[in-house]
Image: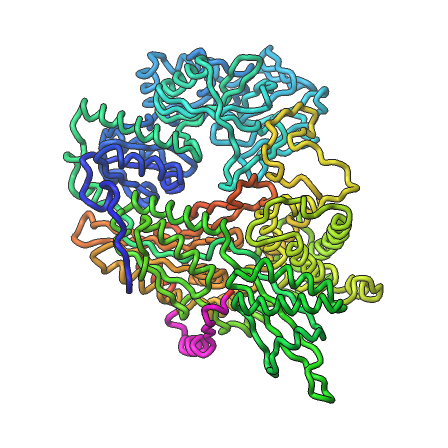
């Protein structure tokens, strides 16, 4: 098989050990995040370092004595991280720590944080504290480290909070604590620093009620609750005055030691709870300058908590700044300048430390040297292709002689593919229009399709003769036009980014894994294009990737081996959504149906009603608006006419249920007692997402009801508080138009999540049967790869690029194998473009005996996916970035995972399954693929 060795980067893990070892001790979600990858890759260029990622396997499963040795330690807490083990490690090995490990526990209690801020003379909002748990508990070592940093006795600092609050009075418009009162509007924060469920209680002047703040979910960070009026009666709480900030913004500060402080503003979650996000899915923020006083605050906070790399939140009110939160280790997202400065300053700190003491690594026992720790040896992954245009088709029947002439006497179907062939069809259209043929509207639509799409290899026209039964002459022809499924500019950017980011990830984990790379692709153009673009970035942009990618139709191309089973499942789905059919709640819960949603058949009916209204609005706007001016720039060879062609087809499906006369009253009455085919849902969802990303202004403009009242300002508040958020500079950045459009997206997305996974089986037995018929060859290849990598002398990477059906099939086989999983199947989001299923094989030398041991982890990414596409602020790339991977299974021994999946290879009917696959393979001619 062909492979390619990539160019050699700076010294890193997997070559010789660098002069100094930098260890990253945090959970994989943080250690392998995009910001961390950027910083660590830059750090390699600043000095002779080796980087060892401890990883979840070591941190969670290994005794501290077996953790790898290092000179410099980057260690920080997040949910699920065993801080006590990290503290033990620091005591045992005594590395240079970037952030004090033991002092991170001080951030767990907001009372401790506020008391320290008071002691340091740092302004905070006016507050009252209610203690019902006897006061905060502080680790003695943390208290000692605090005194060493500041010269203060932490127990004296915390004296005012070290007992239970004796007197608490709650009134309608204020709270009174031991004689001190605080009037609404105020914020109620849990004393527990890891609890982010915060409440706001509004005064009567503000309209009353409250707002519940929480960790960001999608595009929301808070919700207004008119019934929220009485503060909590149990547990310990901090009550802070809600301060009216400048521009309704928070400011987030990021320190890297005392000399570098970065600041960004964001819309405060107290405004309306709506989060502005970019195409990375990250909250939109704006860089801002700090005053000397604010910079001094940041330096004091960093020093007081012993956190060199530290984040904190401040408010600006009437020219003064107040700290409202301290976060410990925090990254700036998407800032190359920050990544450069952070890497440079960390390297300088490391070199200053080695001037004071020698390297610690040489004194560490050989068995826990970094090169003997758990290290990735194999990376096997399956990818869905990147963004593409919707696949579409149009049919017309015509008696126009110019189209009959296209047959050139043939009695069989004639297919036109090449541009010069398609120009003949365009000429037939022009001639027919000159003859004033009755099909003029359909012919003009056909002409638009050809003019926009004939340069694309996925466009073809089929002309089929239809004969007069009496004379045998051709009386008319059916013209079928198919186009779409083309790799987009967004797909190009997604594939590049994913290849580059995965390269950085592997470069940190084990650079040698890049030395033996084999990539396999299906023959479909969009899949091959994804693999080509990805490979160039993943391999470091070599001069040529010739021979790197192998086309494997038998593993990755379409097969109709599961056609009968798939058709049977689709018939069942039609039954499940027929009008009046009530699906048991337990069955709905098993597929992740939202609890606040009515039955699927009700949602389908609502989709049809909304589509009927949107059809009326679109057709009316087409009459009264200059549609060519709604959106000036079109990508992907699109136009207003093609937009309408796409949506009229969807309207026919969901308003007319695919057939019938939309004006016929009897037909309308019949449709009220039927339902659209659930198989149409993925196509509608595809069109909605595509136009929301690529044709946002037109989607918004053409579906805006001209008779509807103007929408409220995006930053307007529903609770009476003032809102003066920064306006967007992109008029098409967020959809504010038809509420019907938002409802439609919500309902269609819900139905898609219900329909799409179940098209590959409703019962476990159906999922297993369909999964094997589609994905067995691919699964066998992956299992073979893992065994081969285990016994190989060198690390290896094996990558497979395919389409959605194969990813669904493989995912079902993983879940049905019996392997213990961390995430339920119905909790996974949709399998969007560049969805990934990854198999990471880790190896290390055994400590107590000769030989090696192996661990495997299976991961998943939903790809370029974001739940609320209508709320994404777009740039010219129209490109959603790929979501980080999550772990489907914990680290398990390789043999255990192989045993679960090898059960498929011991099925009594395996030979029958394989014979059926072989008999039903479909080898498409390459140029016919779409």
Write down the quadrant of residue 479 in the picture.
bottom right
Q: Is the magenta stretch mostly helix, strand or loop?
A: helix
Q: Position of residue 816 (x, y in %)?
A: 46, 62
Left-right relation of 769 to 737 = left
Q: Is residue 324 visible?
A: yes
Q: Position of residue 250 (x, y in %)?
A: 54, 24
Name above or below for residue 675 compared with residue 93. below
Q: Which of the two residues, 14 or 537, is positioned nearer the viewer here?
A: 537
Percent across and percent down for residue 597 are 67, 50
Q: Which quarter of the figure has residue 631?
A: top right
Front residue of 563/663: it is: 663
Quarter of the rendering containing residue 271: top right
| Residue 97, percent from left and from top | 29, 28
The answer to if 744 sits in the magenta stretch is: no
Is 921 or 523 nearer to us in this picture? 523
Q: Is residue 501 above or below residue 605?
A: above
Residue at 72% in and 84% down? 468
Task: Judge whether residue 896 can be spotted in this image.
Answer: no
Q: Is residue 288 left or right of residue 464?
A: left
Range of residues picked out in magenta: 905-929
**Residue at the spot 39% in from the left edge and 24% down from the top edge:** 255
Is residue 452 toward the left or the right of residue 835 in the image?
A: right
Residue 609 horizontal side relative to residue 450, left or right: right
Q: Does the magenta stretch include residue 928?
A: yes
Q: Which residue is drawn at 74% across and 69% down?
A: 435
Q: Quadrant of the N terminus?
A: bottom left
What colour scheme has been applied to the protein in the rendered image? Answer: rainbow
């Amino acid at each position: 098989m062909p492979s390619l060795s990539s160019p050699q980067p700076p010294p890193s893990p997997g070559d010789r050990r660098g002069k100094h070892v930098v260890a990253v001790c945090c959970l994989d979600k943080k250690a392998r995040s995009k910001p961390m990858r950027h910083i660590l890759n830059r750090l390699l260029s600043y000095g002779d370092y080796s980087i060892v990622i401890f990883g979840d396997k070591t941190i969670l499963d290994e005794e501290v004595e077996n953790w790898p040795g290092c000179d410099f330690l980057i260690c920080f807490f997040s949910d699920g991280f065993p801080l006590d083990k990290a503290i033990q490690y620091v005591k045992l090995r005594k590395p240079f720590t970037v952030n004090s490990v033991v002092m991170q526990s001080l951030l767990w209690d907001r009372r401790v944080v506020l008391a320290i801020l008071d002691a340091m003379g740092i302004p905070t909002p006016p507050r009252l504290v209610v203690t019902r748990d006897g006061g905060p508990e502080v680790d003695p070592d943390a208290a000692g480290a605090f005194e060493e940093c500041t010269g203060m006795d932490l127990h004296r600092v915390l004296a005012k909070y070290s007992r239970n609050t004796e007197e608490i009075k709650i009134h309608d418009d204020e709270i009174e604590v031991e004689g001190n009162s605080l009037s609404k509007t105020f914020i109620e924060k849990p004393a527990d620093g890891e609890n982010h469920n915060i409440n706001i209680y509004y005064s009567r002047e503000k309209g009353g009620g409250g707002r519940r703040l929480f960790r960001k979910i999608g595009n929301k960070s808070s919700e207004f609750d008119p019934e929220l009026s009485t503060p909590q009666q149990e547990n310990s709480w901090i009550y802070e005055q809600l301060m009216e900030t400048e521009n309704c913004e928070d400011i987030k500060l990021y320190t890297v030691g005392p000399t570098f402080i970065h600041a960004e503003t964001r819309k405060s979650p107290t405004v309306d709870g709506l989060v502005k996000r970019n195409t990375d899915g990250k909250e939109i923020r704006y860089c801002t300058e700090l005053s000397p006083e604010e910079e001094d605050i940041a330096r004091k906070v960093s020093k007081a908590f012993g956190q060199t790399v530290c984040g904190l939140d401040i408010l600006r009110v009437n020219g003064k700044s107040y700290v409202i939160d301290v976060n410990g280790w925090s990254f700036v997202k998407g800032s190359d300048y920050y990544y450069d400065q952070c890497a440079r300053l960390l390297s300088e700190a490391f070199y200053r430390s080695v001037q004071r003491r020698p390297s610690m690594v040489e004194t560490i026992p050989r068995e826990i040297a970094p090169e003997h720790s758990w290290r990735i040896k194999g990376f096997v992954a399956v990818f869905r292709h990147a963004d593409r245009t919707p696949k579409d088709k149009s049919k017309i029947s015509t008696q126009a002689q110019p189209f009959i002439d296209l047959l050139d006497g043939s009695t069989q179907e004639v297919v036109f593919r090449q541009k010069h062939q398609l120009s003949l069809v365009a000429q037939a259209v022009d001639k027919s229009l000159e003859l004033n043929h009755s099909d003029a509207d359909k012919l003009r639509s056909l002409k638009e399709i050809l003019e926009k799409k004939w340069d694309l290899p996925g466009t073809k026209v089929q002309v089929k003769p239809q004969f007069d039964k009496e004379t045998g002459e051709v009386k008319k022809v059916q013209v079928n036009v198919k186009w779409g499924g083309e790799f987009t500019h967004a797909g190009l950017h997604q594939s590049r980014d994913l290849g580059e980011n995965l390269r950085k990830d592997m470069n940190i984990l084990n650079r040698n894994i890049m030395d033996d790379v084999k990539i396999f692709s299906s023959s479909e153009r969009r899949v091959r294009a994804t693999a080509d673009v990805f490979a160039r970035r993943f391999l470091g942009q070599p001069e040529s990737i010739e021979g790197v990618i192998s086309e494997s139709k038998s593993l990755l191309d379409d097969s109709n081996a599961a056609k009968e089973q798939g058709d049977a499942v689709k018939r069942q789905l039609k039954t499940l959504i027929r009008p009046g059919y009530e699906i048991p709640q337990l069955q709905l819960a098993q597929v992740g149906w939202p609890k606040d949603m009515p039955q699927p058949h009700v949602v389908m009916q609502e989709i049809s009603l909304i589509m009927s209204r949107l059809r009326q609005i679109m057709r009316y706007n087409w009459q009264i608006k200059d549609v060519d001016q709604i959106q000036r720039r079109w990508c992907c060879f699109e136009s207003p006419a093609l937009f309408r062609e796409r949506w009229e087809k969807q309207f026919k499906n969901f308003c007319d249920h695919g057939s019938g006369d939309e004006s016929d009253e009897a037909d309308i009455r019949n449709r009220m007692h039927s339902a659209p085919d659930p198989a149409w849902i993925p196509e509608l969802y595809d069109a909605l997402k595509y136009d929301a990303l690529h044709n946002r202004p037109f989607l918004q403009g053409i579906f805006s009801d001209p008779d509807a009242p103007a929408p409220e300002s995006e930053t307007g508040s529903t609770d009476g508080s003032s809102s003066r958020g920064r306006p967007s500079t992109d008029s098409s950045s967020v959809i504010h138009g038809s509420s019907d459009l938002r409802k439609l997206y919500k309902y269609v997305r819900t139905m898609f999540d219900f329909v799409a996974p179940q098209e590959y089986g409703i019962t476990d037995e159906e999922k297993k049967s369909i999964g094997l018929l589609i994905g067995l060859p691919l699964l066998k290849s992956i299992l073979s790869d893992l065994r081969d990598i285990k016994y190989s002398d060198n690390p290896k990477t094996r990558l497979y690029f395919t389409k959605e059906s194969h990813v669904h099939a493989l995912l079902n086989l993983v879940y049905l194998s019996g392997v213990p999983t961390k995430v339920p199947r119905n909790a996974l989001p949709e399998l969007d473009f560049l969805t990934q299923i990854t198999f990471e094989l880790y190896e290390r030398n055994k400590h107590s005996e000769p030989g090696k041991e192996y661990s495997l982890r299976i991961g998943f990414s939903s790809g370029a996916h974001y739940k609320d596409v209508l709320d994404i602020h777009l740039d010219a790339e129209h490109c959603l970035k790929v979501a980080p991977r999550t772990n489907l299974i914990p680290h398990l021994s390789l043999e255990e995972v192989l045993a679960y999946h090898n059960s498929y290879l011991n099925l009594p009917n395996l030979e029958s399954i394989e014979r059926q696959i072989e008999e039903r393979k479909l080898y498409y001619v390459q140029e016919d693929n779409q």
